[in-house]
Image (cartoon, rainbow, N blue to C red):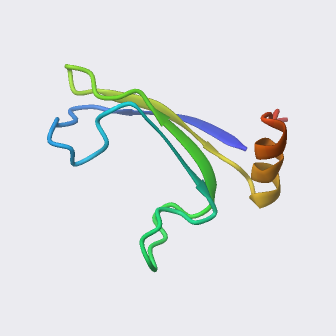
Amino acid sequence: MKIEKFIHKNVKSDGTVITKPMIRMSAGEGCGVKDCHCSDGYWISIGSGRTLEGIIEGIIVRFDDKKEFERFMKTHEVIGG
């Protein structure tokens, strides 16, 4: 499992990216667009929503594989090593 923090600056309020607080995940299906591989794998992303200064912060958890993701979904916990 890998946990990364992200910060996007100068985000416009026009909705070209998600500007509201959000939680998204992929259980292996990625973004769902046919033949797209922009976000394959098993992950959970949490974003804070856009501040008045145009900043969005959040974290993304990328699971190593389906087995690790399923363990998390079953036990609600994965501790890295």
> What residue is at 16 percent from the left and 37 percent from the top?
12
What is the residue that sits farthest to the top in this orientation?
52
x then y, percent, for residue 56: 34, 30
x then y, percent, for residue 22: 43, 36
The part of the image, by quadrant, that contains residue 36 is bottom left
x then y, percent, for residue 42: 65, 55
x then y, percent, for residue 6: 45, 34
The part of the image, by quadrant, that contains residue 7 is top left
Q: Indicate whether 33 appears above or below 35.
A: above
What is the residue that sits farthest to the bottom in this orientation?
35
Q: Indicate whether 52 appears above or below 17.
A: above
The part of the image, by quadrant, that contains residue 49 is top left
Q: Indicate whether 50 appears above or below 68.
A: above
What is the residue that sits farthest to the front in this orientation?
74
Tell me the quadrant of the picture where the C terminus can be found: top right
**Left/right of residue 22 with respect to residue 8 in the rendered view:** right
> What residue is at 52 percent from the left and 41 percent from the top?
45
Tell me the quadrant of the picture where the N terminus can be found: top right
